[in-house]
Image (cartoon, rainbow, N blue to C red):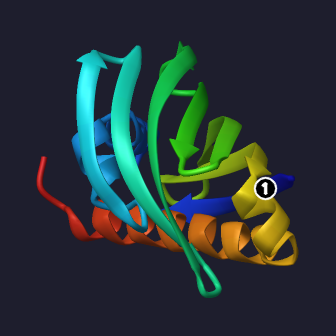
Amino acid sequence: MQLKGDVTIKAPRKKVWDFLTDPNQLAQCVPGIESVEEIEKLKKYRGVVSVGLGSVKAKFNGEVDILELSEPNFAKLKAHGKATGSTADAISEMKMSDAPDNSTLVEWTADINVSGQLASLVSRLMVPVSQKLAGVFYDEVKKRIEGNTGG
């Protein structure tokens, strides 16, 4: 399942980059996040996320590996999670570029593969729910960066 989108954030690129590479800041924006643990700074993280797809709920335990960082332009990561009877894998990329009025354009993609019970039970909900969750995430990122005028 391929997802993509973009968001313009009214903040300089360095500020957006710093936010998007801080797992503690990001964790506050991820729908359903229960915990995040840094294993190796800017390299590897572990976390727990609960996802609801219709009437089906799943709790994923997983890890995120940062594959590539090019400050303040590009980030690529890989995530792998397991829930009872299901697995999820994702590769996500974020490209950041300057936008008018000292804003930053973040263009993102996510290639997500869910297999197992969850996939068979709610396959038709996967794309719309995943796209919605991504939208919620980036809306929250935008709100927090734009609302945080302090250094």
Label 1 amino acid?
A: Lys
Observer-nearest of 67 and 7: 67
Specify whether 36 is left or right of 74: left
Q: Position of residue 51 (x, y in %)?
A: 51, 67
Instruction: Look at mark 1 in the image and give the residue it sits on.
Output: 4
Specify whether 93 is left or right of 31: right
Q: Position of residue 6 (x, y in %)?
A: 70, 59
Q: Position of residue 147 (x, y in %)?
A: 25, 71
Observer-nearest of 10 and 70: 70
Observer-nearest of 77 and 79: 79
The residue at 12%/56% (across/down) is 150
The residue at 65%/76% (across/down) is 132
**Above or below, comparing residue 6 to residue 40 in the picture:** below
**Quarter residue 120 falls in:** bottom right
Observer-nearest of 101 and 140: 140
Note whether residue 11 is visible: no
The residue at 69%/75% (across/down) is 129
Q: How many marks?
A: 1
**Quarter residue 46 falls in:** top left
Which type of secondary structure does the marked residue at label 1 adopt?
strand
